[in-house]
Every structure is written in C-alpha cells, then in structure tokens.
C-alpha cells in the first residue's frame, strides 16, 4: 500500500479547500481517504494487459423503452454558437464580455 494520509495532510487540504473540519471530521476524513487509496492500490494490482483500451465505459446504445431494442446515440453535429452580444443582452448584469456575479467565496 502507498503511504497513508496523515492528519496534517488532511488539515492542509481542508485549508486549501477553505473547509473547516472539526477534529473528529478530520479523523473520519483521514480514515476515508486511506480506505479509498487502499482500494486504488487493489485496482493497481489487477492485470489489465489483455484488456483493450476504451474511449468510454458506457454502451454506444440507449435502450428504447417501448420495445427493448437499442438506438444509436444522436450524431454529433456542428452547429453555430450563440452570438455573444445576444447572450449578453439577455443577462441580468454584464460588462459586455463576461457575466457579472455576486462574490460567493470570502476569506
């Protein structure tokens, strides 16, 4: 197993994420993070040399609920984007190029 996460590391990550953790929360977070890392170590031990790489993990079909057969996903079609001026005109507050929003994070 890789090195375990320490309480000091949990506290540092919480500080960087601007989270306040009580002492018991930090201990619980340490336990949970170490459990996750232990699981990742187990996954690393699996031999995947014979598994073909995939671009996505889901099937390329969506089940048709009426008859149970699958349908292809819709084609990815290039379409023109919205014009910035039109979008900015309908926004509640802008500077002409960007949306203005209230500040939500304070330090």
Image (cartoon, rainbow, N blue to C red):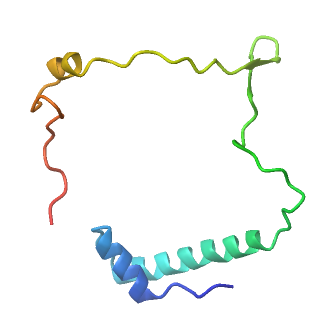
Residue at (27, 17) in percent of width and height: 83
* 83 is higher (above) or lower (below) than 20: above
Is 43 in front, or is 30? 43
- Identify the image quadrant of the N terminus: bottom right
Q: Residue at x 67, y 77 (%)?
A: 38
Nearest the viewer among 3 and 32 is: 3
Determine which quarter of the picture holds residue 16.
bottom left
Q: Nearer the viewer, residue 52 or 68?
A: 52
> Which residue is located at x 63 percent, y 18 percent?
75
In the rendering, at what x and y percent does residue 64 appear? Answer: 75, 16
Q: How many marks?
A: 0
Q: Is residue 34 left or right of residue 89?
A: right
Taking 103 as reference, is 41 left or right?
right
Query: Depth check: 37 or 87 in front?
Result: 87
The image position of residue 31, as x and y in percent, is 54, 80
Toward the right, the furthest residue is: 50
**Which residue is the extreme one toward the top?**
66
Q: Residue 32 appears at what percent x and percent y?
A: 55, 74
Judge whether 6 appears above or below 20 on screen. Answer: below
Quarter of the image with the C terminus in it? bottom left
Which quadrant of the figure has residue 76?
top right
Indicate whether 57 appears above or below 60: below
Q: Residue at the location (73% across, 19% down)? A: 72
| Looking at the image, residue 94 lies above or below residue 85 | below
């Amino acid at each position: 197993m890789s090195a375990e996460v320490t309480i000091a590391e949990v506290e540092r990550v919480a500080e960087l994420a601007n989270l306040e953790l009580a002492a018991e929360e930090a201990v619980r977070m340490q336990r949970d993070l170490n459990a996750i890392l232990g699981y990742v170590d187990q996954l690393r031990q699996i031999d995947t040399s014979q598994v073909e790489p995939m671009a996505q993990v889901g099937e390329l079909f969506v089940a048709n609920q009426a008859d149970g057969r699958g349908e292809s996903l819709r084609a990815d079609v290039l379409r023109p984007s919205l014009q910035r001026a039109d979008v900015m005109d309908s926004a509640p507050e802008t500077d002409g190029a960007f949306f203005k929003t209230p500040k939500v994070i304070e330090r």
